[in-house]
Amino acid sequence: MYIDWSQIQKRETVPEEDDWSVFFYDASLPAAAAFSAIYLIPFIYHLYISYVAYKTGQYFRFSFSVPILVGALLETIGYGQRSSSTQNVQDIGMFATSQTMIVLAPVFVCASLYILLSRVMRFTQPEGTAEKEAKVLNGFLKVSWLPKIFVTLDVVSMLTQGGGSGIAASGEWEGSLEDIGTGVLIGGLALQLATFSVFLIVVITFHLRALRGGAALEDGMIKVIYGIYIAGFFIMVRSIFRLIEFSWGIDSYIMTNEWPLYVLEAVPMLIAFMVIGWYHPSRWLPASVAGESKFKSWLHRRRNRNTQHQSLSSA
């Protein structure tokens, strides 16, 4: 019997209509599952130090550490979703959800660092300086504006990235829409990188002025600043990776291989979470640095009004 091997080979190399995947490679289930489990470690630790240890009186709770806890949870769920996505390679919704959570997690971490720095700066101002009047950068900028500016820029960059992805996806990542969407996406990533770079410059400037005698930093504050440096370095590595990833395009080596995602995204962010955990403000900063959140202040005033109202009613 004659066998036409050329036809068989041709048939084997032509993919079936339904044989496609949201991944550009064979995604690893063990890797995704492993990182989902590993990220439980910083999540549980931050949950303990922010709430359990606070309830037992071991540490003071800092409300601005909550976003870090949220970020660790997003990483855990994100890689868990990725595990499921590796077994459902045509489920775009599941893939998009996992990617969104993994990309959003660093935004929450950065938000906590922005607020942390502003609190430390306010605490180290000369005695008699009103909290809202404390300034940095040679009096050019109020300290109270720092977290608002940085968080706003981070949110804008996040929305820009989402908008760019949406534009490119609407054209199925082809043609002019791909070029426009990718350009917008890269712009959002560049803005995020620039925002965090400026933040680190502000940290370094503040630290150098303190070392020269501009402000008295306690040992605990110095440790926390070191933590910001180390965690900031790994967040920068991750941000640079993301910028290069999309700048090189979907046919690049980074896009068509899985290991860069784990080595340059998952591992750096895991180290950042662990470093922030070790240099957690609850461990090293005095309670006076925490301040009172606006929500807590509003809740306290509301409870007082309700108590007074009930007292008047009963009278």
Image (cartoon, rainbow, N blue to C red):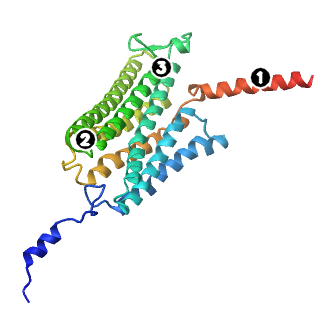
Q: Position of residue 306 (x, y in %)?
A: 78, 26
Say which mark, if any, is on residue 216. 3
| First-in-chain label (2 vs 1) | 2
Residue that appears at 57% across and 33% down: 63
Q: Residues within 10 Å of mark 1 (few under 14, many from 20)?
A: few
**Hey, which quadrant is residue 293 in on the image?**
top right
Q: Is residue 226 visible?
A: yes
Q: Quick one: label 1 or label 3, which is nearer the N terminus?
A: 3
Position of residue 237 in the picture relative to residue 301 (left or right): left
Query: Which label sits on residue 305?
Result: 1
Type of the residue with mark 3: Ala
Element type at mark 1: helix
Counting from the top left corner in percent of width and height, residue 130 is at 56, 11
SS of the residue at dot 2? helix
Residue 297 horizontal side relative to residue 277, left or right: right
**Mark 2 is on which residue type?**
Phe
- Out of 148 and 3, give the one closest to the viewer: 3
Classed neighbour count for the residue bearing mark 3: other residues with Cα under 10 Å, few (<14), some (14–19), many (≥20): some
Res 131 quadrant in image: top right
Q: Residues within 10 Å of mark 2 (few under 14, many from 20)?
A: some
Placement of the N terminus among the 4 image quadrants: bottom left
Pinpoint residue 313: horizontal percent, then vertical percent. Answer: 88, 24
Which of discs 1 and 3 lies nearer the camera? The answer is: 1
Tell me the residue that label 2 is attached to. 246
Q: Mark 2 vs mark 3: which is more N-terminal?
A: 3
How far apart, in angstroms, are the residues tagged by discs 2 and 1?
Answer: 53 Å
Q: Position of residue 198 (x, y in %)?
A: 34, 25
Residue at the bottom extreme of this rendering: 1
Quadrant holding the C terminus: top right
Please report the residue visible at 27 percent of the width from the left and 54 percent of the height from the top: 259
Label 3 secondary element: loop
